[in-house]
Image: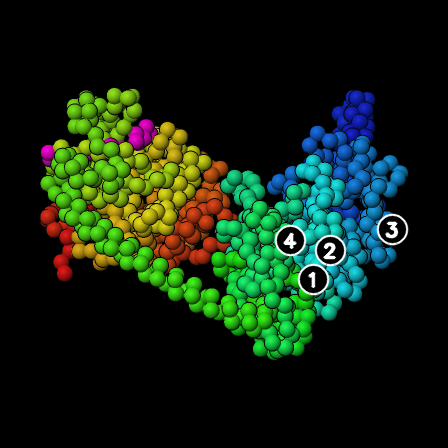
């Protein structure tokens, strides 16, 4: 990247170097050489220091003594934004603009929108009076026309993306003689005002580009219309294309989707001096912009570091009802209705023939003309308020006073609250036609429409009759549905009693299990042939459930066969649990169950084959761990987190895995992680958040304290296990097999001690190399891991927060002391009297019975 006037420094440095070489060629004596070095050394130092200081001083600032040529840029002090010359697409025109440095194609302000340069001779400078001028050779292409003269003018690119002209070094708004934020293009930036100053007459509004490759002013503009109650509109020439409506204290009435959120906060200001809308970002590490596209559609974009792209957060054009006055006057648009347009009650279509031909543009007219002295109001709810260009408002009146005022004026056609925040306040009156109304399923606004009393009486009678008919239909329908549900429950209970009773293949097929779970049943002969009769050569490993074999089906598909062992601590309950838990789960980070095999006493589960086996075979092996670089490790951590989030939040039922460990994380051929072994999983329904059991199952070293000690389990139990996994992946050491010689700490305790001593980098696996110790991402993973293994469940984050922590750069809370941070002898199971060694590396899932 070239900075301002870098040619000057380079030129003089080269001149000095040339003189030095010339002098050296003719300085043959040693003494002369030494004298040469003594003379030129300070000159070199001076030149390079002056160049460096010159670069630093002009990084974000331009003064009258300097200029910027095509190929040079200004960069804001925080490094977020850049100003310079650019071209678009295949066009040769050169423009001066400002863009995001993380995304140079995201240009949000252009100086010479209408007058591109067709050469690389463009120069940007500031005059002694404070005008920014863009020159093409000697002619002025664009100028800021700064309103006030300055004694010491300075141009500076702020870290908000705002290009400002200041007099001296002041940074306050009143010190700005000119700013680009007052002249927006197609983008509303955080901190930029959009609206009108009633004192100066300045109107700030967005104008779309002509096309994606042409920043000239396009067909559409987004502005605040100040006729009547100010409202946000999209204009095409002098016509309204789309209308977000007026501000109601919470949002624009036509955009109830605009709600408080963790990304940005917004503000709408209306007083005697100005009206404007602006938003600010809640987190300075987030980049967001609001754009009006060449098509007239508006969109809010957020930058995602993970994908290095802009993702659409929201968009304006959702359905045809967004088109201004799509249904004409006195009609409501309902995108989910059939037909889409419907006249207000008390109104009829102006052109019935056109209306029946799906042309609603003529709208509706009153069935009965207003009498002025004998009128009332019909209430509509959840509406986008009508066009307010012919409206009147008062901030202090109550809704009752508003109704009375409307009745006194024969031209008043409707009224509503001005502000719906709290209990509602203020008065908004309409005079004349009601246009551009839309119904929402929720979050709309109440509108009171004026009708004659005779119309109101007819509407009340019709609504009463309609309600009686609807209640009769609902009663008959609900009775029928209830009968079907009861019959369905009876059949379901009957089938459940038969299901798995004796658990043979024939029982399973005959009782409809295959149909219920959509799970294929494999023949025992096919599985035996696929695994070479369960040959030891095909054995992949063995867990608490039993051995796992590699097999190849007749079609050539490679599978993994998990065979329930007769001596396994797990049995029919675990087998059924795994079948029902995972049969319908679909997620890229969960192992896929392909089917099962049930014949006699043989019970097997058939999974997709994972060629890289399990995670523990990599991270705990000194040789293979070198194959797992940090890029793969962080991808595995994030993949496990997304899989757990799916189980806890996004699956049909909330599922608690209860046996999350390194050996239950399988890796496919691309090293993508997949959570496996759901034999010990439990499902929660409804709003259930935790449960308690007398039968402790799982693997020591991964169990949470509240579960291992008291049998209480919840989603926070899995979070604890995930935290252990994260620390194991980062360190390459087992929690259960790790013993610190000095203080008998296990891996959690060792990580905690290093953290509080600010030596967390010592925990990082040596196979990752020295450069990894400097990675903020690795330290962030250690931080997240310690948050997950905290002693108290309520202190641990849920998985949605964990996924966000891993994928952003937001500040994290301080972790507290982890649970089970001291290495202790394991409790004994009921069936055994042999104590385990303190540093056992046993990872077989354990079942332990607890007394009452």
Compared across the picture, whether 183 is left or right of 382 comes to right
User: Residue drawn 15% across and 52% down?
Assistant: 849
Residue 362: mark in rendering: 4
Marks 3 & 4, CB-CB < 8 Å contact: no
From the top left corner, tell me how far across and down residue 306 is, in percent.
50, 41
Q: Which residues are magenta?
A: 600-613
Q: Where does the image place residue 558, in percent across and percent down from the top left?
A: 29, 25
| Badge 1 or badge 3: first in the primary sequence | 3
- Report, in whole angstroms, how far the alpha carbon at label 1 lies from the one at label 3: 45 Å
Q: Secondary structure at mark 4?
A: loop
Marks 1 and 3: which is nearer the front?
1
Residue 244 in view of the camera? no
What is the distance, in whole Å, between disc 3 and disc 2 at their CAs? 27 Å
611 within the magenta span: yes
| Among numbered discs 3 and 4, the one appearing first in the sequence | 3
What is the C-alpha distance between the residues marked 4 and 2? 34 Å
Q: Which residue is mark 3?
A: 128
Label 1 neighbourhood size at 10 Å, few (<14), some (14-19), many (20+)?
some
**Crowding near the residue tagged with mark 2, few <14, some 14–19, many ≥20 C-alpha atoms within 10 Å:** many
Q: Label 2's element?
A: strand
Q: Quadrant of the C terminus?
A: bottom left
Q: CA gap, disc 2 to disc 1?
A: 19 Å
Q: Nearer the viewer, residue 497 or 539?
A: 497
For label 3, count other residues whose C-alpha is less than 10 Å away and answer few (under 14), some (14-19) or many (20+): some
Disc 3, SS: loop
Q: Nearer the viewer, residue 205 or 163?
A: 205
Mark 3 or mark 2, whichever is nearer to me: 2
């Amino acid at each position: 990247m070239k900075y301002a006037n870098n040619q000057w420094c380079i030129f003089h440095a080269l001149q000095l170097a040339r003189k030095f070489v010339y002098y050296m060629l003719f300085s043959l004596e040693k003494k002369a050489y030494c004298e040469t070095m003594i003379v030129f050394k300070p000159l070199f130092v001076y030149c390079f220091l002056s160049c460096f200081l010159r670069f630093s001083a002009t990084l974000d600032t331009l003064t009258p003594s300097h200029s910027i040529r095509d190929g040079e840029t200004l960069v804001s002090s925080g490094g977020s934004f850049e100003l310079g010359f650019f071209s678009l697409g295949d066009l040769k025109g050169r423009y001066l603009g400002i863009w995001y440095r993380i995304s140079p194609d995201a240009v949000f302000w252009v100086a010479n929108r209408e007058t591109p340069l067709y050469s690389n001779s463009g120069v940007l400078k500031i005059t002694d009076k404070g005008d920014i001028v863009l020159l093409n050779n000697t002619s002025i292409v664009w100028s800021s026309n700064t309103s006030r003269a300055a004694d010491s003018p300075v141009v500076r690119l702020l870290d908000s993306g705002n290009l400002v002209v200041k007099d001296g070094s002041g940074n306050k708004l009143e010190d700005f003689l000119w700013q680009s934020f007052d002249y927006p293009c197609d983008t509303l930036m955080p901190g930029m005002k959009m609206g009108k100053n009633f004192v100066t007459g300045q109107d700030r509004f967005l104008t779309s580009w002509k096309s994606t490759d042409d920043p000239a002013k396009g067909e559409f503009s987004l502005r605040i219309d100040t006729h009547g109650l100010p409202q946000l509109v999209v204009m095409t020439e002098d016509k309204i294309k789309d209308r977000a409506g007026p501000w109601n204290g919470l949002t624009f009435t036509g955009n109830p989707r605009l709600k408080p959120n963790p990304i940005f906060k917004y503000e709408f200001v209306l007083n005697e001096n100005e009206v404007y809308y602006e938003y600010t970002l809640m987190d300075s590490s987030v980049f967001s912009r609001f754009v009006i596209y060449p098509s007239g559609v508006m969109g809010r974009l957020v930058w995602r570091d993970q994908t290095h792209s802009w993702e659409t957060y929201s968009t304006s054009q959702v359905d045809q009802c967004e088109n201004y006055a799509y249904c004409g006057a006195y009609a409501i648009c309902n995108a989910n209705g059939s037909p889409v347009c419907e006249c207000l009650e008390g109104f009829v279509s102006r052109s019935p023939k056109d209306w029946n031909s799906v042309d609603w543009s003529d709208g509706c007219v009153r069935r009965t003309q207003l009498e002025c002295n004998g009128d009332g109001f019909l209430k509509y709810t959840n509406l986008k308020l009508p066009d307010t260009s012919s409206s009147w408002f008062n901030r202090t009146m109550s809704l009752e006073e508003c109704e009375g005022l409307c009745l006194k004026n024969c031209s008043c056609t409707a009224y509503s609250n001005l502000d719906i925040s709290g209990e509602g306040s203020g008065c908004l009156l309409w005079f004349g036609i009601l246009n551009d109304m839309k119904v929402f399923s929720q979050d709309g606004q109440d509108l009171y429409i004026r009708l004659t009393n005779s119309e109101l009486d007819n509407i009340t009678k019709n609504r009463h009759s309609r309600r009686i008919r609807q209640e009769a239909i609902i009663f008959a329908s609900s009775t029928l549905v209830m009968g079907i549900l009861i019959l369905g429950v009876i059949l379901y209970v009957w089938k459940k009693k038969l299901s798995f009773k004796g658990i043979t293949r024939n029982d399973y097929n005959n009782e409809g299990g295959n149909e219920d779970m959509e799970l294929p049943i494999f023949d025992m002969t096919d599985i035996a042939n696929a695994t070479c009769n369960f040959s030891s050569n095909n054995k992949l490993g063995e867990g608490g459930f039993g051995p796992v074999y590699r097999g190849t089906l007749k079609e050539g598909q490679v599978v993994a066969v998990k065979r329930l062992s007769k001596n396994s601590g797990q049995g029919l309950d675990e087998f059924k649990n795994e079948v029902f838990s995972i049969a319908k789960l679909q997620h890229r980070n969960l192992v896929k169950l392909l089917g099962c095999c049930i014949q006699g006493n043989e019970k097997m589960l058939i999974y997709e084959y994972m060629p890289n086996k399990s995670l523990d075979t990599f991270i705990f092996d000194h040789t293979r761990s070198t194959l797992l670089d940090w890029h793969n490790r962080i991808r595995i951590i994030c993949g496990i987190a997304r899989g757990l989030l799916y189980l806890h939040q996004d699956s049909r039922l909330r599922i608690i895995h209860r046996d999350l460990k390194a050996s239950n994380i399988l890796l496919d051929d691309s090293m993508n992680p997949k959570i496996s072994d759901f034999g010990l999983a439990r499902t929660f329904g409804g709003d259930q958040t935790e449960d308690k059991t007398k039968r402790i199952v799982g693997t020591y070293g991964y169990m949470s304290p509240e579960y291992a000690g008291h049998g209480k389990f919840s989603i926070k139990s899995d979070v604890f296990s995930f935290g252990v996994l994260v620390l194991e992946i980062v360190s390459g050491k087992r929690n259960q097999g790790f013993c610190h010689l000095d203080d008998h700490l296990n891996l959690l305790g060792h990580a905690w001690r290093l953290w509080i001593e600010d030596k967390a980098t010592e925990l990082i696996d040596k196979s990752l190399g020295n450069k990894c110790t400097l990675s903020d991402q690795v330290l962030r993973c250690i931080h997240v891991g310690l948050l997950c293994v905290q002693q108290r469940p309520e202190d641990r984050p849920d998985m949605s927060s964990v996924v966000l922590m891993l994928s952003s750069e937001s500040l994290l809370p301080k972790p507290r002391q982890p649970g089970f941070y001291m290495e202790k002898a394991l409790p004994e199971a009921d069936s055994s009297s042999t104590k385990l060694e303190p540093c056992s590396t046993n990872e077989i899932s354990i079942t332990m019975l607890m007394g009452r």
